[in-house]
Amino acid sequence: MRIILLLSTIAAFAASNASAQSINFGDDSSEWANDGECDDGRFTGPGLTSTPLLQEDVLADATDCKRAFEAGRLTLAGVAADGTIDFGNDSGEWSNDQECDDMRFAGPGMTSTPLLQDDIMRDATDCRAAFNAGMLTLAGQ
């Protein structure tokens, strides 16, 4: 029984490290980097700042986000462990305008206007269509 518990613990640790290694956390160029809170809107969980998320902090708070992710205090917002993306719904003010407004994504299918925290997972149709057309990727991938 102890061997099974030990092996499952090792497997879980290896899986979490593999997941962390496949995420591009970016760099520490944010004004709010290294303050102990993740400011990157691609993440969710208790390791995320309680202040408004800003577009310029995506991929710009690597150390804080990686530490919180590895401690199990963050996950990628709307992305399952197997990589399946939950695009959310179309409840955002700018949904269904043929531009993705969700700061979790990057690419030519994105809007050129500033991205807002309120639009995370709230522009599903536009983001899914652009993603499926190869015009978007998850930011940092």
Image (tube, rainbow, N blue to C red):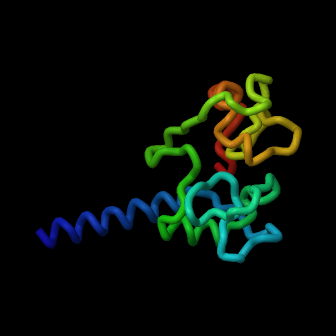
Q: Residue at x 72, y 59 (%)?
A: 59
Counting from the top left corner in percent of width and height, residue 86 is at: 55, 37
Q: Nearer the viewer, residue 84 or 40?
A: 40
Is 6 above or below relative to 140?
Answer: below
Q: Residue at x 69, y 53 (%)?
A: 41
Q: Residue furthest bottom?
A: 35
Q: Nearer the viewer, residue 107 or 41?
A: 41
Q: Residue at x 56, y 59 (%)?
A: 45
Is 33 above or below relative to 122?
Answer: below
Counting from the top left corner in percent of width and height, residue 69 is at: 54, 64
Q: Residue at x 56, y 44 (%)?
A: 78
Left or right of residue 75, residue 52 in this image:
right
Quarter of the image where the N terminus is located: bottom left
**Rendering quarter of residue 137:** top right
Counting from the top left corner in percent of width and height, residue 97 is at: 79, 23
Counting from the top left corner in percent of width and height, residue 51 is at: 74, 62
Q: How many marks?
A: 0
